[in-house]
Amino acid sequence: MEQPPHTQPRWKHRPAGSTWGDFGPDDQLGRLNLLTPEKVRQGVAEVREGLSFALSLPLDYPGGSALNPARHPPVLRPTVRRGLVNFNCLLAELDAGRTDVMSDDLAILYLQYSTQWDSLAHAGSMFDANGDGLPEALYYNGYAAGRHVVGPQHLDDTGVPATPGAAGASTSAAHALGIENMARTGVQGRGVMIDLRAHLGDSRTLVGYDTLMRVLEADGVAVEPGDIVCLHTGFADVVLGMRRHPDPAVLQNACAVLDGRDERLLQWITDSQLAAIAADNYAVEGLPARPGPACCAALPLHEHCLFKLGVHLGELWHLTPLAEWLRAQGRHRFLLTAPPLNLPGAVGSPVTPVATV
């Protein structure tokens, strides 16, 4: 979707340690700018066996809405063809003599229910970008809630609450930072597996900088600028074992999560210049995060990555078969191809990532 025109800079001051403006004043890709042709060639160079691994869960997992009451599994329904249910539809009933049998369907789809990417419009922060003492709700590179990322809770130009239009009309849209920007890059490059499960098992472990560095050193893993980091924790396997009946009490105590309150860990994400992070757990970081000051983000790693750095986050990827294969081969790098849906205005998207080794 086209970005609404602006007549003045979106910000005078950027958050400390952020990349705002580093890729241009109107950038909407963030660290994906580091997925250069050279990074694609590096990923292709990791293809030796010609084996491919699909890294997505079925989109009806985890099942139900116990993990997140705001997200629900997909619903499939048939379309209608000239008054007939367009599923096992006999075209002879519409046009005598036709032999065709047709089926079309639609999906009611919560875009961040299962294996997903978050766009940079998924998580923002209150920040005083103009230096006037009045924090605003902003996203990466100063794009603003209510101006660039718009929902029905905002007022229109006449002061009347926005209301749905014709049946089926959209009532929210990221006019900047939408998932379509990510999709257009193809999200292809070199993936790097960090196998936390192999070292920490399936118990709940809050992973800070020191633990992460020990894992990287033990496995000889190096993360270089533009790499897409995949964190294998085993969480998706636990979810699959629950067969669409997730137990939140069990899952809240399962598998490794990053400690979003660890400032040294956040600094490592900054210094490594990784392009994106994908994990097989529910939120990449611990949810809820370790208690912190009341002034600060509830999801500090999301704020650091999406809001400050422009680092996209992927969640609930199914990484175990790939991680186990890589470990058996003494490898940790692979070609990753993971474009989301090219759905203008969406702030998240299902994804079917493919790793090739």
Image (spheres, helix red, strand yellow):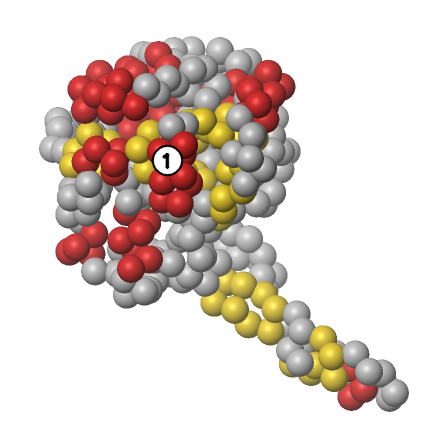
Residue 82: x and y in percent read 74, 79
Q: Is residue 130 visible?
A: no
Residue furthest to the right: 97
Q: Residues within 10 Å of mark 1 (few under 14, many from 20)?
A: few
User: Is 160 placed above or below 83 here?
Assistant: above
* Residue 240 to residue 2: above or below: below
Q: Is residue 155 left or right of residue 220?
A: right
Residue occupying the point 20% across, 56% down: 248
Q: Amino acid at mark 1?
A: Ala
Q: Residue at x 53, y 14 (%)?
A: 23
The picture places residue 71, in percent across and down from the top left corner, at: 36, 56
Residue at the image position 38 percent from the left and 28 percent from the top: 330
216 relative to 158, above or below: above
Tell me where residue 348 appears, x and y as whole percent: 46, 43
Position of residue 219 measured from the top left corner of the image (x, y, whole percent)? 30, 23
Q: Specify whether residue 260 is in view.
A: yes
Which residue corresponds to mark 1?
A: 328
Residue nearest the observer in this picture, 320 or 230: 320
Quadrant holding the N terminus: top right
Vertical placement of residue 133 versus 231, above or below: above
Relative to 354, 321 lies left or right: left
At horizontal 33% and vertical 64% (from top left) the residue drawn is: 244
Instruction: Determine whether, in the image, residue 202 is placed left or right of residue 29.
Output: left
* In front of the other: 95 or 282: 282
Q: Nearer the viewer, residue 9 or 190?
A: 190
Kindly state the secondary structure of the residue where label 1 is placed. Answer: helix
Q: How many marks?
A: 1
Quarter where residue 140 is shown = top left
